[in-house]
Image: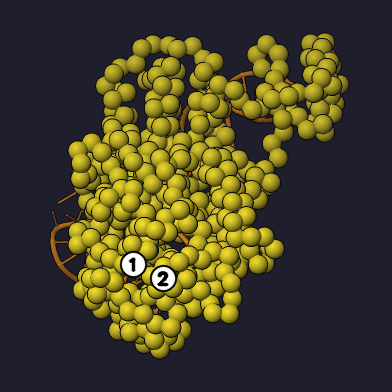
Chain colours: A yellow, B orange
RNA sequence: GGCGUGGUACCCAAGUGGCUUAAGGGGAAAGUCUGCAAAACUUUUAUUCAUCAGUUCGAAUCUGAUCCACGCCUCCA
């Protein structure tokens, strides 16, 4: 039985799908105006784990992720610039080029982290009609009003507005860091449709019943999820930051328009912190996946790092912590590789195997407790009463959830990559020296090989060469 | 000002009333092995869970107070 923490109820609830055996799920993807940083990837990773756990439990999953390429404003309560347009201006490219470029980088990074692609990626600009008709629907039902700069949602008309995030609207007003627009009726009201500036031609703008403009940021998710998954579906997830505003607004829009319950389970991933503070794009303090790769880390080292913590807890990122994950991951792979070579040994007692399997299942089904699942993997690998073959099979089975490419890595270890001939010859010479007990020469040759960037390691009947770890 | 998290070994991090006198990984130390080194294997590494009170037969886990750190109420995964 799968249990997950539902932000709506604020408790760990048993997961019961709307339709037996099937799950419809939506998550808020990237806004493609800049690179995604490793904190963003923590959330995409968490959603990936959720999908994998659902599939491991036998559910058929229909998974949609959006790509925001319009309407996401820089700040100021619907008064800032559009992030896409701003980024395009700064880089001297068209918004469409910006969108294409950052989407491609995102897709590449996602793949490197072995995050399974959703069934459908939806772009906000591909669903303008749907967004307009949802705004119309809200207008007809009396949830909107028009100001000088757009069509707004009147949150006071939706009684359950504060439910998801348990917002204290009065308290917000007192400490608000920013004055809110005079034209807004309530501090929490938000734009559904924004008018293009009178004196400026936007690159992205569309005709609408209210005038030329572009959709507000929140409406895209309501419109697209509705179009693809229907009015009422199972799971909606995203980063924790989306809970008080974006997801709260989505519920208000969707439920006001359809009159039905929107989503059954809301899941939110916590932030990755740099030291004690969150990693954030607006402060410029962030790390991309590519920069980790440039530093000599594998994207899967980072994945292993993420598996060590629960998704609902803040995680401190540091090079030290990443290094320990890297070591842990490499150790794991070398253990598995040596299992591959070893004799199979005795047949394993089935009850022992089942014990590990059920511990694993219990961990992943307990609100995706990956740290515990990882400890089950390690205990299993260190166990004395399981044959090498069974260990590898179980590891492969668990890896359907972990996504660490454990078996691929064992099949073709990268250490065997290309050893230059020069190094091979030296190593052979060293073996000769060793055989004639000229250990001084042997050590000299080993040092020489070391300076070429390789390590020679003695084995029972010879040696093996590995690239020095950086 | 309001709302909300969290403080567990040298580091990362599970555990949220008895099964645990606190998982797992990294690191460190000792031993076996080895010409040496590495790897591998074995063992060790928190009588203690920010602090102080309290509830309980029993608390890291519940309650209260205190200290500290962080997030949200501007955009953000």
Q: Which quarter shows the N terminus of chain A?
A: top left
Q: Which mark is residue A462?
A: none
| Of the pair B70 and A24, the residue shown nearer to us | A24
- Secondary element under disc 2, as helix, strand or loop, is strand
Residue A353 in view of the camera: yes
Say if mark 2 contacts mark 1, CB within 8 Å.
yes
Q: Position of residue A222 (x, y in %)?
A: 34, 59
Q: Residue at x 28, y 36 (%)?
A: A59
| Of the pair B2 and A224, the residue shown nearer to us | A224
Q: Residue at x 39, y 58 (%)?
A: A129
Residue where numbered disc 2 is placed: A193
Residues marked 2 and 1, same chain: yes
Q: Chain of mark 1?
A: A
- Secondary element under disc 1, as helix, strand or loop, is helix
Q: Identify the image quadrant of residue A262.
A: bottom left
Q: Residue at x 37, y 83 (%)?
A: A184
Residue where numbered disc 1 is placed: A135
Q: Is residue B30 left or right of residue B7?
A: right
For label 2, count other residues whose C-alpha is less than 10 Å away and answer few (under 14), some (14-19) or many (20+). many
Q: Is residue A393 left or right of residue A10?
A: right
């Amino acid at each position: 039985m799968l249990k997950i923490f539902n932000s709506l109820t604020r408790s760990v609830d048993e997961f019961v799908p709307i339709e037996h055996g099937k799950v419809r799920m939506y998550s808020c993807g990237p806004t493609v105006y800049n690179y995604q940083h490793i904190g963003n990837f923590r959330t995409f990773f968490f959603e990936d784990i959720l999908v994998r756990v659902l599939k491991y439990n036998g559910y058929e999953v229909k998974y949609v992720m959006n790509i925001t390429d319009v309407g996401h404003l820089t700040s100021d309560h619907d008064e800032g610039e559009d992030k896409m347009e701003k980024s395009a201006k700064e880089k001297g490219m068209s918004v469409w080029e910006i969108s294409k470029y950052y989407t491609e980088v995102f897709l590449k990074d996602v793949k490197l982290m072995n995050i399974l692609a959703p069934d459908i990626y939806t772009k906000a600009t591909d669903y303008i009609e749907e967004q307009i008709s949802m705004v119309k629907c809200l207008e007809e039902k009396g949830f909107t009003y028009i100001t000088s700069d757009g069509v707004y949602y009147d949150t006071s008309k939706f009684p359950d507005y504060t439910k998801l995030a348990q917002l204290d609207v009065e308290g917000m007003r007192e400490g608000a860091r920013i004055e809110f627009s005079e034209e807004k009726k309530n501090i929490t009201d938000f734009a559904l449709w924004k008018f293009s500036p009178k004196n400026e031609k936007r690159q992205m703008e569309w005709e609408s019943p209210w005038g030329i403009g572009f959709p507000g940021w929140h409406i895209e998710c309501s419109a697209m999820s509705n179009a693809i998954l229907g009015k009422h579906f199972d799971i909606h997830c995203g980063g924790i930051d989306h809970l008080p505003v974006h997801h709260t607004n989505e519920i208000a829009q969707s439920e006001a328009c359809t009159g039905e319950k929107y989503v059954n389970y809301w899941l939110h991933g916590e932030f990755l912190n740099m030291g004690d503070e969150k990693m954030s794009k607006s402060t410029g303090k962030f790390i991309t996946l590519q920069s980790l790769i440039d530093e000599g880390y594998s994207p899967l080292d980072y994945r292993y790092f993420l598996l060590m913590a629960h998704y609902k807890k803040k995680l401190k990122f540091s090079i030290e912590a990443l290094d320990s994950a890297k070591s842990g991951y490499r150790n794991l792979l070398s253990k598995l590789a040596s299992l591959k070579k070893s004799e199979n040994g005795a047949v394993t007692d089935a009850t022992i195997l089942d014990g590990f399997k059920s511990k694993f299942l219990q961990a992943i089904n307990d609100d995706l407790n990956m740290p515990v699942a990882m400890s089950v993997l390690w205990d299993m690998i260190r166990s004395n009463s399981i044959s090498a073959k069974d260990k590898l099979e179980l590891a492969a089975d668990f890896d359907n959830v972990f996504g660490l490419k454990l078996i691929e890595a064992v099949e073709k270890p990268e250490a065997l990559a290309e050893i230059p001939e020069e190094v091979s010859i030296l190593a052979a010479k060293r073996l000769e020296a060793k055989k004639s007990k000229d250990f001084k020469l042997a050590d000299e040759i080993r040092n020489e090989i070391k300076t070429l960037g390789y390590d020679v390691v003695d084995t029972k009947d010879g040696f093996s060469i590995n690239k020095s770890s950086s």
